[in-house]
Amino acid sequence: MPEMRPAIVGGWKAARRRWTTGTALAGLSRSAPALIAAATLVQTALAGSALAQNALSGGNTSAPALFSPAEMDRSATVALAVMLGIAAVAAVTSIQLLRTRRRAAAREGEAAAEIAALQARLDRASALLLADPQAVLIWPAGSDTPEVLGNPALLGDAAGRLLAFGTWLDPQAAGQLDRAVAGLRDRGEGFVMTLSSRTGQPLEADGRIVGGQAVVRLRDVTGTRRELMELAARCHELQTGGDALRALVEQLPAPAWVRDSAGALRFANPAYARAVEAADAAAAVSGHAELFDRAARRDLLQAQSTGTAFSGRLPAVVAGERRSFDVFAASVPDGGSAGIAFDASTAEKLRTDIARLAEAHRRTLDHLATGVAIFDAGGRLVFYNAAYRLLWDLDPAFLDQGPSDSIILDRLRGARKLPEQSNFRQWKAELHEAYRATDAQPGEWHLPDGRTLRVVTTPNPEGGVTYLFDDVTEGLNLARRYDALIRVQGETLDNLAEAVAVFGSDGRLRLSNPSFARLWRLSPEELAERPHVEAVIAACRRLHDAPDIWRALHGTITAIEDRTPVSGRMERRDGSVLDCATVPLPDGATLVAFRDMTDSVNVERALIERNEALEAADRLKIDFVHHVSYELRSPLTNIIGFAEFLNDPATGSLSERQQEYLGYITSSTNALLALINNILDLATIDAGAMTLSLGEVDIRATMEAAAEGVRDRLVKDDIHFEFRVSPGIGSFVADERRVRQVLFNLLSNAVGFSPPGETVTFVAQRTADTVVFSVTDHGPGIPDEVQERVFDWFETRSQGSSHRGTGLGLSLVRSFVELHGGVVSLNSVVGRGTTVTCVFPADRGAQRNAAE
């Protein structure tokens, strides 16, 4: 076994250390006799020295000696001491040697016994390692080359490539094992995993750190171990499946539960908790919250006790609302039960709604004029409406029995209500082909009683056929009458004196009467080809080439949305006068009518000449009005003066109402006076009696005085004022009062037509010969066709603004400017504003001549 080998190896190393120690002690015991021999030689040398000394003296002690007795005593004493020391050391060493030899012998015996035991243990471990089909990889610390033990043959042909995991494992398993081995060697993370070789052989990989070494064991899983592994995999699979089912049950919107053998609630999902208004599923289980009433629970418990499944619809109260649930409960092996309830309230409501809809559909069909009969896949009548029964005059009792399609046709044939057929059996078989068709088949039946029916057979999605019978007899009669009416209308158009042509929505001629061809000298062959309106216009231009009228006709005929009727008068080259009018028709066509108005125009011209005479008389009346205006001015001046006199506090106090009335009188008389003054000024100018009071006119001061007159209106209407004049513009010779009146009228007109928030620009420029004043507003602008008339008397147009006036302001402007020898021009764009420019001559002599 891998975990035994490091212990065995460690024991072996300890035995080797003890063996080395014993050997050293044995060497020491072998050197002890040498020490003893050395001590003996020293002792003998000392004795020999003493004898030699004695011989030299001849044994006579009195004879002179080589050494004196004192010296001899010291030498003997030293030798004796050395001898005694060596003897003592030798004795002690001998004693220690004997003890050490005994201990070394004992330890050597123990080490030999331990080595033998470890060898036996190692042999047993090796035998066990080789007996089990496994391989062990051992990575010593700091080494990348592992030691391989065991039986690598269990991996088959890949035994020689054990470390190349990809050669005997699937790529995914090989990568997993590589990462696990790297984690074991780098971070000491152990692992246990089950692998499968390329040949399908199950293997177990176990990695751990033992004695500072990374050890990985690979062994074949066989027998009981393999069964355990399979059982573990099966257990994991069942646990995973159970967890998945539990998660699914918890996510179900339908309440689900599990009860024990006693019927007590053991598990509930969140939907169950919501249904019983519990805080969560655990609270529902602990509180034994019940979804159904006592009777329903009794039925469920009875089915559980008998071991049968329960399936049925039970009522329950959820959130204060009574609902219906489709419940299914089944017994489980431990004697309990598991159930689930699906909310059937929506399905019940849909079923009710479908039934109600079907009933409404039946009632609707009963009110239809179209006969409806529905047959099932077996050809039996399942529905008919009142129109079907009345159409064929069939007995309701007979129809309520659900007769077959063939029986009804036979009965109708017997009553001579079906079309006459030479081969009725074949006709009926062809009619019944609708049961096998996929598309609706229309047809017409001409009945013996003169009626014509339009019959449509429609296959039903669930099988069977629906018959639709429409009585089109009246429609055919209407079509015949319509054709007759068309012919009558055609004859009527052909005999009209007016020229009439009808153009379709595509612009092509649909019909025309002979008067149209005669009036425009068109040949019937050209009109028969249904020419386009452009070709007709090109042909008609030979007699009248006015592009405006033809453009208008072309636009209204070819327009898609704006089909505004067009009317006008044209005078042809041959002297005839025609009135033209268009009428849009409901079907998108356009009727164009031409009427010869030559005689009427001649009469009209005569009337115009007479009208001109009347206009001359009218001018006389205008002159009279001018005269009267002069006469009105004096009393009006008196009224204004007396009104001012009454308003003066010196004449006495007035009541509040009197002051109000006096204010009305003053404002009205001032307005009337201004109007009369304007009329008189225009009359004076027209009469050539107007004279100018010429003098030096300060341009800037005159402009500021005119602007001051409209200052209150600028503030009131929230209009911005832009004043542009150079400081050194100087002055020019003119009538200052008339120039100020011209500028005031221009500003008043611009302010009146400017919307709130816009800007009125007042500009003065000086050139070598002229002084130019211009006023620009950003109002609605003046259309081109109106610009020529804005300077006429009493010509006023609001152009969509709130401005109202007498229409004399611009007339006075032009008259006074021209009286000074200048010109007035107007530049206006609809929607962008208007600029009025007054050019006064700067030459004093020219101005005097103009004034004269």
Image (cartoon, rainbow, N blue to C red):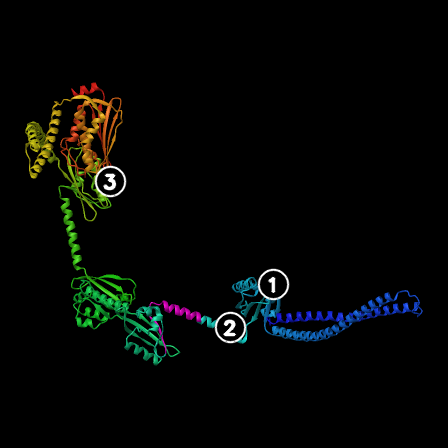
Helix, strand or loop for disc 2: helix
- Specify the amino acid type for callout 3: Glu
Which residue does the numbered mark 2 point to in the structure image? 229
The answer to whether residue 312 is left or right of residue 148 is left
Instruction: Identify the image quadrant of the N terminus.
Output: bottom right
Q: Residues within 10 Å of mark 1 (few under 14, many from 20)?
A: few
What kind of residue is marked 1? Ala
> How many discs appear?
3
Residue 443 in view here: yes
Of callouts 2 and 3, the N-terminal one: 2
Residues at marks 2 and 1, CA–CA distance in whole angstroms: 32 Å
Q: Viewed as shown, does residue 319 lie left or right of 600?
A: right
Residue, far top: 845
Asked if one can make out residue 545 in the rendered structure from this viewpoint, the answer is no
Which of label 2 and label 1 is nearer to you? 1
Contact between marks 2 and 3 (CB within 8 A): the answer is no
Q: Is residue 538 above or below residue 382?
A: above
Figure check: 316 above or below 447: below
The residue under the point 68% across, 71% down is 15
- Residue under numbered circle 3: 534
- How far is mark 2 from mark 3, CA to CA? 95 Å
Instruction: Give the side of residue 144 with respect to residue 64, left or right.
Output: left
> Mark 1 falls on what kind of element?
loop
Instruction: Of the two numbered discs 1 and 3 on the same chain, state the one appearing first in sequence.
Output: 1
Residue linked to disc 1: 141
* Magenta segment includes 743: no
Nearest to viewer (mark 1 / mark 3): 1
Range shown magenta: 239-260
